[in-house]
Amino acid sequence: MRTTDGSRCLPVRRLSLAACVAVLAACTTAPPASPDMAWVAQARSVATAVPPKLVSVLQEEIARSGHEGAVQACSDKAPAMAREASAASGWNVKRVSLRNRNPQAVPDAWERAVLEDFDRRAAARVPPAQLERAEVVFENGKPIQRYMRALPVVELCTNCHGTPDRIAPAVAARIKTLYPQDRGTGYGLGDIRGAITLRRPAS
C-alpha cells in the first residue's frame, strides 16, 4: 500500500504476548513472514531484545546502589546497548521520546508522527505491546526500512520518570546533574515513555 508521500506502508500483524521481565521486556513469536514481512520480523526481534537486557541491568544496579545508581547506569548502559545491538544486527538502533531525557533521544519527523500515533492509540486503550509501526520510506530517492516499538512505563520506570512524589530527592538531584535539560518525568503507569526505533537501507 502506498501512502500520499509515496512511501510504502507495510502492515504489522498483532501478536500474542508471552510474559517477560516487565512489560518493557515483552517478546513475541512472529507469525510466518512473507518476503515483504521478513525484514519486519527481524526488526521486531531486535527491538524486543534490547529492553529486557536494560531492565536486568537496572534491577541489579538498584539492588546494589539504589535508584540513584540506576540513573547513572541507565545513562551509561542504555546507549552502549543500543550501539551493541546496532553492530550485531546491521540496524541503526536507538531510543526516542517526545519528552526526552537524553539529548540524543530527540525524534525526527517520522518518529515524532509515530510516537504521537502511539499516544493516541494508547489513550484509546490499545495494549502497549501492539504499538508498533513498520514502513519503507524514501529519503533522497532511496528506500529506507523503518521500525518503531513503544516503550510503556512500568513500576520500575516511575522511580526515575514518574511524578515528583515518586522521585526521591537524591534521584532528582542525580537526574539534574546528568541531564540539565531533562523532560522525561511526570509519567504514570501505562504511559508511553518513548520507543525503540530502528532504520537501515532497504536491500
Image (tube, helix red, strand yellow):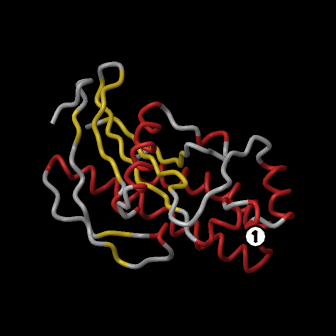
Instruction: Report the number of discs.
Output: 1
Q: Residue 194: x, y in percent?
A: 52, 51
Q: List the residue tagged with mark 1.
A: 67
Instruction: Report the residue that reaches farthest toward the top.
Output: 140
Quadrant (top left/top right/bottom left/bottom right) for the N terminus:
top left
Q: Nearer the viewer, residue 182 or 203?
A: 182
Q: Alpha-carbon neighbours of circle 1 within 10 Å: few (<14), some, or many (≥20)?
A: many
Q: Quadrant of residue 141?
A: top left
For residue 84, side relative to residue 120 (left or right): right
For residue 42, side relative to residue 23 (left or right): left
The residue type indicated by label 1 comes to His
- Which element type, helix, strand or loop, lies under badge 1? helix
Quadrant (top left/top right/bottom left/bottom right) for the C terminus:
top left
Q: Residue 103: x, y in percent?
A: 67, 39
Q: Nearer the viewer, residue 186 or 129?
A: 186
Seen at 25% across and 65% down, the residue is 30
Q: Residue 80: x, y in percent?
A: 61, 54
Q: Quadrant of residue 150?
A: bottom left
Seen at 55% across and 69% down, the residue is 154
